[in-house]
Image (cartoon, rainbow, N blue to C red):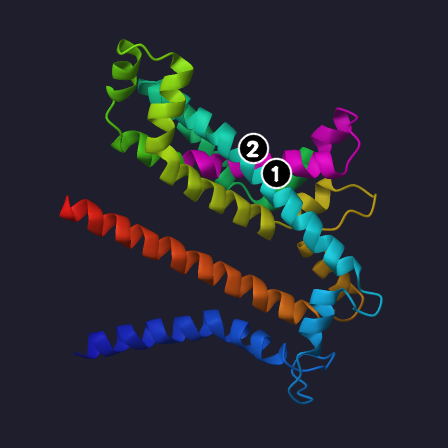
Amino acid sequence: MMKKILAKAYIGILLVLLYAPLVFIAVFSFTESKVLGNWKGFSTRLYRNLLTGDMQGNSSLLTAVENTLLIAVVAALFATILGTVAAIGIHNMTGRKRQAISFLNNIPMINPDIITGVSLFLLFVFLHISQGYVTVILAHITFCTPYVVLSVMPKLRQMNPNIYEAALDLGATPGQALRKVMIPQLRPGMVSGFILAFTMSLDDFAVTFFTRGTIGLDTLSTYIYTDARKGGLTPELRPLMTLIFLIILILLLVINLRQDRLQKKAEKI
């Protein structure tokens, strides 16, 4: 009995520590105070400023959000394509080759972001590539692709190994077999990989910081870092963080409900 109480208390404390800061930011997004923690009465002015772009000289925040979303979408798309192809290639390997490539695929995920960022920075300097959008997107594709591979591999293991060969025997070309037979089987893993890559790109700071160059390119993470160094944070960041959290929460709920429905249909069949 005592173990159950302690376990529930531990989970409760953990949830409070995780979500209390988010609730705190959400609450203070409904006040006009420039200082977080100073309540000046209920107001939706920060939300209006954010949505209309009227932020008293802080319009660069919207530019940073646009850059973040653009880089995340492009990087996640390319990482999903490359990661899926790589996963199929690794799956078709055998023995030590598969183990070696799988091991190499795991290294970027374990490697600290700052080491990845510095390494890519030195590589781009060595290759005389001007730093900016291109280098940031290439860097994000580089560290996102292994996560897609990790998401697609379980679906490959679950798939009937003879289904691709059967499609070829029935007259399909390799491209048709890949597009019409394998991709539908791998789609859940690809979607999961895309969402994971998008989230990783959205959240990244270290790699972006070292590969963005000096052209003034800012993503949300680098904008917050620069803003904090000036001695404070733009008040409109509070409603922005709240909206991002709500969007992610809604997406997770939709995905989980969809998976539950699909699982129930599969059980009925």
Residue in front for this viewpoint, 23 or 191: 191
Quarter occupied by residue 1: bottom left
Q: Callout 1: few (<14), some (14-19), or many (20+) C-alpha neighbours within 10 Å?
A: some
142 w.r.t. 39: above or below: above
Note whether residue 235 is visible: no
Q: Measuring from the top left, give residue 156's x and y in whole percent.
A: 32, 30
Residue at 72 percent across and 43 percent down: it is: 210
- Residue 160, position in %: x, y? 23, 26
Q: What residue do we see at 23% from left, 19% from top?
A: 162
Label 1, on which residue? 74
- What secondary structure is found at the residue carrying circle 1? helix
Q: Is residue 138 left or right of residue 165?
A: right
Looking at the image, residue 153 lies above or below residue 248 = above
The answer to whether mark 2 and mark 1 are in CB contact below 8 A is yes
Query: Which residue is painted at 58% across and 46% down in the image?
Result: 201
The residues tagged by marks 2 and 1 sit, at their Cα atoms, a distance apart of: 6 Å
Answer yes or no: is residue 192 visible: yes
Amino acid at pointer 2: Phe
Circle 2 SS class = helix
x, y (%) of residue 205?
65, 50
Closer to the camera in the image, 174 or 197: 174
Magenta: main secondary structure? helix
Q: What are the residue bounds of the magenta stretch?
A: 121-150
Residue 145 located within the stretch drawn in magenta:
yes
Q: Which residue is mark 2?
A: 78
Q: Which residue is rendered at x = 62% and y = 41% of the image?
A: 115
Under mark 1, the amino acid is: Val
